[in-house]
Image (cartoon, grey):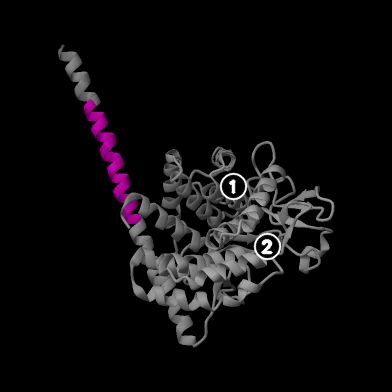
Amino acid sequence: MRKFTIFLSLAALLAACTGNDEKRQEAGNTDLFSEAIKTAEAQIGYQVKVIEESGKILNARTIENGHVQYISRQDWTSGFFPGTMFYMYDLTKDPKWLDVGVKYTEDLDTIKHLKWHHDVGFMIDCSFGNALRVTNNDAYKEVIIEAANSLSTRFRPAAGVIQSWDEDRGWQAERGWMCPVIIDNMMNLELLFKATEFSGDSTYYNIAVSHANNTMKHHYRDDWSCYHVVDYDKEQGGVRSKQNAQGYAHESAWARGQAWGLYGFAVSYRYTGDERYLEMADNIYNFIFTHQNLPDDLVPYWDFNAPNIPNEPRDASAAAIAASALYELVKFGKEEYRQTADQIMASLASDSYKALVGTNGNFLLRHSVGSIPHDNEIDVPLNYADYYFLEALTRKMRQEGTL
């Protein structure tokens, strides 16, 4: 009897120690994220100060040769910096972020007419979509609907997809494509779903569903990794080729592309309730987070099949996108994904990725990759890494009731 009592006491002690360890870890992460918010206030706050003192509306994307690179309204990343202002407002409740968020967002109004590439979804939903969410200004709904009209002009009925890039522009014209569709395009579908919600016109919804279904059918391999580019025949339908433009090789798994797909199918499930999209997100999750080349801190190398792993650049932007998608999936009953998302966020909020105040061009996160095959933006901060990290943190804190 005494031995049994001792055994129970030891078990209780171990349970108590485990519980205390978890509480200490949780407290440590809370401090980590609080520090990340403070760093974001300082870094992004100074970025805003520089812009405001210039007397112009500038849009920060990255750094090059030690200098901040500002971009035009028509750059595909132009919605992220304005959108970041609204997540800073969510996290701090400081009205200064709301004021500049509205100012920088409304500067992008003409993008609603952009028709020569597919990224109008990124550009308008990340800016005006967040502005609408925070301010409830119905005028922003009209911007979203008009942008969806512009995006819809790129729908190719024979192939059932939204064409990503024009086949006769820039470096894309050298590839011999007819209707290139990139996995990133899944991120533009939210704009279409919202346009149907705001207008009552199901055309946008139907285009989004057609695109998601064809992406699910043609972009993914048997192991649930995805190609970056699928080239369709826009006149007869069908697939002409499957390639990688920003990954290591045509049959490799470009890390940010995997994250775009995970996020895009989570959003598609949110708006449709189609269980196939939720299952697709599960499959993509399993590919990413059981991959033998995924580092222990869950921040991937820029391509899962890059030849010099572990001596390859990491991509914090891919990790941030995936974390935000996972918190979205938690809302749909995937509670088991919370721990993975928390681990990614703890890594990104650590000194390994979070910048020191006054460094990194006043961006928050370090160590992202734009496109290694194009020798562009390698191991630098990127505005969309910051955007999705802050979006993920906002989602996490809301789910935990701390925001």
Tag 2 residue: 152
Q: How many marks?
A: 2
Q: Is residue 156 above or below residue 139?
A: above
Q: Tell which of 136 and 71 is nearer to you.
A: 136
Main SS, magenta region, reads: helix
In the visual, does 29 lie left or right of 347?
left
Coordinates of residue 335 in the picture (x, y in percent): 42, 40
Question: Which residue in the protein does label 1 denote?
Answer: 310
The amino acid marked with disc number 2 is Ser
Labels 2, 1: front one: 2
Image quarter in which the C terminus is found: bottom left
Circle nearer the N terminus (2, 1): 2
Q: Do labels 2 and 1 touch, CB within 8 Å?
A: no
- Magenta region, residue range: 12-32
Q: Which residue lies at the image location 50% right of the left edge and 50% below the top edge? A: 325
Residue visible at 66% across and 44% down in the picture: 216
Q: Nearer the viewer, residue 305 or 260?
A: 260
Amino acid at pointer 1? Pro
Give the side of residue 211 with respect to residue 134, left or right: right
Q: Residue at x 61, y 54 (%)?
A: 205
